[in-house]
Image: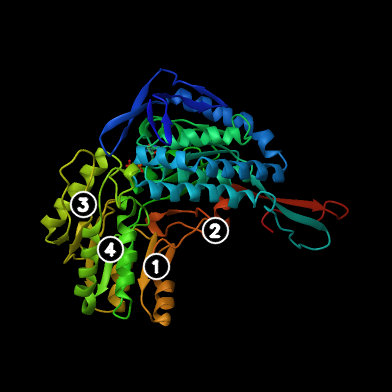
Amino acid sequence: MVTGPDIDIDATHDLYVGGEWSPAADGGRFETENPATGEPIAEVASATAADVDRAVAAARDAFPAWRDTAPDERGRIVHRIGRLVREHADELAAIESLDQGKPVSQARSDVEGAARYFEYYAGTADKLEGRSVPVGPEQVDFTLREPYGVSAQITPWNFPGNLFARGVAPALVAGNTAVVKPAEQTPLSSLRLAELCAEAGVPDGVVNVVTGFGDSAGAALSGHAGVDTLTFTGSVRTGTEIMRQAAGNVTPVTLELGGKNPAIVFPDADLDAAADWIAKGIFTNAGQVCSAADRVLVHESVREDLLDRLVERAESYELGPGRADPDMGPLASEAQFEKVRNYVDLGREEGATLAAGGGTPDREGYFVEPTVFTDVEHDMRIAREEIFGPVLSVISVADEAEALQVANDVEYGLVAGVFTSDVTRAHRLAGRLAAGNVYVNKWFGDTNQTPFGGYKQSGIGREKGLEALDSYLQTKNVAVNLADGDGADLPGA
Ligand code: ADP
């Protein structure tokens, strides 16, 4: 058991299915480790396809009663989850920081966001109204917004607990039940959140958690005929695979995938403020953020001024284990550490200049220094591929047209940022950037209330805000005849 002032983690963890804890069908378990040391924290059940069957069956069984629970009551229960998340905020943040590696103050902010998701969506539970459609005096026509049924949620390892809440809260208020498959690197916060859901009064089977690996538990869930809608956050490669698996059952998917997000800096910007936002945008959570500020597209006349500021900020970061609340923690896993190191090597080979960082501190754990590459050309792989680490690419541009062209000329389109004091230019670019979210003179401007998702390969559908509810509700149109006789209606009219 791992203990500490604010944490108490059991040595073994089971699956949470139908309101009960049970081992995997074959007794399999895997270790989840502390990325600051590489040491194991606990053993977690490794769900098999049979366990996923059981979880989906439990969610299906629980669905009719949950769907038919009065919406205001569903809202109250979901609101109580938010309250419990707040009451356990220190514990949840400690678990997340230990398992994922992020500084505990960032984990605390994730937990605050998780509580907000439950509170925000709780308030929508009794406002999910349909429309009345005026088709003439001979028919009453209206729409109903109905839950899909079983919502599968496959979550990544960068914001595990926060994304549990982001998906489960709207799924539940809309009347769906859920089966959550957290990432194998970071299962612990989801298991604790499932307990808090039960404590809040969520009936057995309405929220289930199957821990396990992507190619076994994840694949079994995404290809399961009993799943009615699927939400995934992660890489494009895995998202594509999940879409393929879901296609077999025509299961609708909501996908929030990667990004290669441009921060465009014009000479009229406040360069100190821009550098602060960009450093925060790329080094928060060690760059393991879909909406990270991966690329700076800076006007050549202020390139050196901005670069100096970015380097100064990068070099000021203190690294350490998340629980000590440093400026930056380790990467979340050895695999990610290797991947990021390979990209740093690649950047050098491609001819970019290392302006800051690039090294790995001489200590245990998966630490990579905050890294800034300059002289980056737009066609280099480090400028086009998602690195998912603390590695910033600085690209020089000659004018607004080139900035826009380079910004949009990647496969991704999740977020983009514009730093300028020219309000006309800010609006002009906001309209033309091919991204689901545009920040002006800031970074990470989304809240629980604002829709979030990608253009192009960055995804399908929207998370957050009222838009997210569209992933959890399907429309039924009801036509009631008021006329005598069989009328003249024919299909296709
Ligand atoms: P990474 O490759 O960086 O580990 P992924 O996008 O593959 O990130 O992982 C996000 C989530 O997707 C995790 O929960 C993982 O277990 C799951 N996953 C990975 N591969 C598959 C798959 N083939 N089918 C379903 N889920 C998967």
User: Distance of mark 2 from mark 1, alpha carbons?
Assistant: 17 Å
Identify the residue under disc 2.
Answer: 449
Q: CA distance from mark 3 to mark 4?
A: 17 Å
- Marks 2 and 3, how far apart at CA: 33 Å
Q: Earlier in the sequence, mark 2 or mark 1?
A: 1
Q: Earlier in the sequence, mark 1 or mark 3?
A: 3
Disc 4 residue type (three-letter) = Arg
Residue drawn at x 29%, y 53% as measured from the top left? 386
Q: Which residue position is annotated with label 4?
A: 295
Q: Is mark 2 in CB contact (under 8 Å) with mark 3?
A: no
Q: Single out the mark in the foreground, 2 or 3.
A: 3
| Label 4 beta carbon within 8 A of ligand 1 | no
Q: Quadrant of residue 270?
A: bottom left
Task: Check if mark 3's residue and mark 4's residue have beta carbons within 8 Å.
Answer: no
Q: Which residue is tagged 3?
A: 369
Q: Nearer the viewer, residue 316 or 378?
A: 316
Q: Residue furthest front?
A: 5
